[in-house]
Amino acid sequence: MNLINNEIKKIFRPINIVIISLITAIIWILFISFNIEYFPNGSDKYIYDISVYMLNKYGISMDEEEFKDLKNYREKRVEKATQYLLTKDEFINSGLSTYDEYLNREENKTLDSNARKNLDKLQEDLFFEENNYLFWELQELDYVIERYDDKDFWVGLGGMDESSSQKQRHEELINSDTSYSPLNFRILGNYHSLIFGITLLILICVPIMIISIFINDNKNKVNYLQYSSNIGRKLFKKKIIASIISSFIIATVQLGILFIVYKSNNTYMFWDCSINSAISDMASWYDMTFGQYIILSVILNYIIAFITCMIAILVSSKVNTYISVIGIQIPLLFVLGTWLNNMGMKYLTSTYYYKYSLHLIYVILVGILGLMIVKRIKKEKILEI
């Protein structure tokens, strides 16, 4: 155990801590902080407020009666919008009398070009000059109601060809109350952006911390001395254990910082809401809540930390210079990071891919890297000096 502790101390040298602290600060500034400081941002605020309203009034899901009540709420807001429009000359002069007529003005053949031009100008003023909350809210509320009404389309692949198992799962979701979950795609998308920022930090920081304990020994030929005794030959295995522990420590610190700061986004209130909502842009193979989805993403980041650690060990234990390590590892980690961003993270449980296809890729990665590490350990035991 003392050997493992010593190796962990080598990994967490002050210079290494300073380097990853700087990298962490840069990544946070470039990729993460915006999604904390400015959420909800722009039109995101209005759909966020609608989700909060639904959660507070109807709970984690709606039934048909509650959905009708949401539509009634929309009508009350429409009445207020109509009253406000009646104070605008552009609206009065157009001959329109209700908000819905104003909303559907493009279909009105009786409007002349001058009236249309004035109404378009009124639209710009309401949304961008006045930044009128009521009209922004109604726009997003109509969008939310439309998606619930057309959930047969939105819960699924959006009209793309489906396999029998995908179709069956989508029908299950459409017929369940979870499709009326108030969790929307802005909240889920914001979380995806944040958690991938942490994944990116793990992909960068773990190799930087790990490679030094192998590179330095190879460069200084310390491993030749280690091979002269049975205890020394076992040191490679101890270094692997220390590296894995250290990678999990790095992941824990990064995740811990995120979830402390993430509290300010005020989305933990959706913890018990299903991710399989008509407004979430997510159809999962599993009946998962937002909280369970967060926990799964945490577990996934530990798996990614393990995979990254194994790659760093295999590469750095076979080369003698940092340039060689960088030249080999950067392409590997870039490919891994690209795959994680495009598929491996947010689509892990999605019906967009076959049920276990992405899971299988993780199993194969862990299995191959694990076998290579075991083979390397055995080789260390019999390697001739």
Image (tube, rainbow, N blue to C red):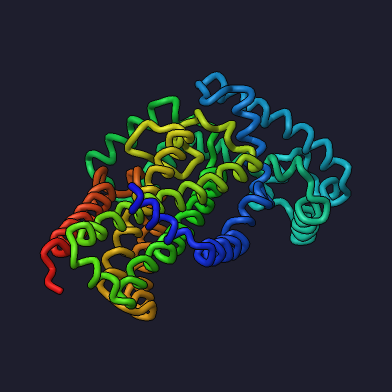
Specify whether 313 is left or right of 114.
left
At x 46% / y 53%, what residue is drawn? 250
Coordinates of residue 355 in the picture (x, y in percent): 26, 43
Specify whether 194 is left or right of 38.
left
Q: Quadrant of residue 154?
A: top left
Q: Is residue 372 something that shows in the picture?
A: no
Specify whether 310 is left or right of 103.
left
Does 211 appear above or below 364?
below
At x 76% / y 40%, what residue is drawn? 134
Q: Is residue 297 something that shows in the picture?
A: yes
Does 220 appear above or below 61?
below
Which residue is at the front of the view, 317 or 187?
Answer: 317
Coordinates of residue 30 in the picture (x, y in percent): 60, 64
Which residue is at the front of the view, 322 or 285?
Answer: 322
Coordinates of residue 178 in the picture (x, y in percent): 44, 29
At x 31% / y 78%, what residue is drawn? 320
**How many numbered badges does the structure rendering display?**
0
At x 56% / y 47%, what residue is drawn? 258
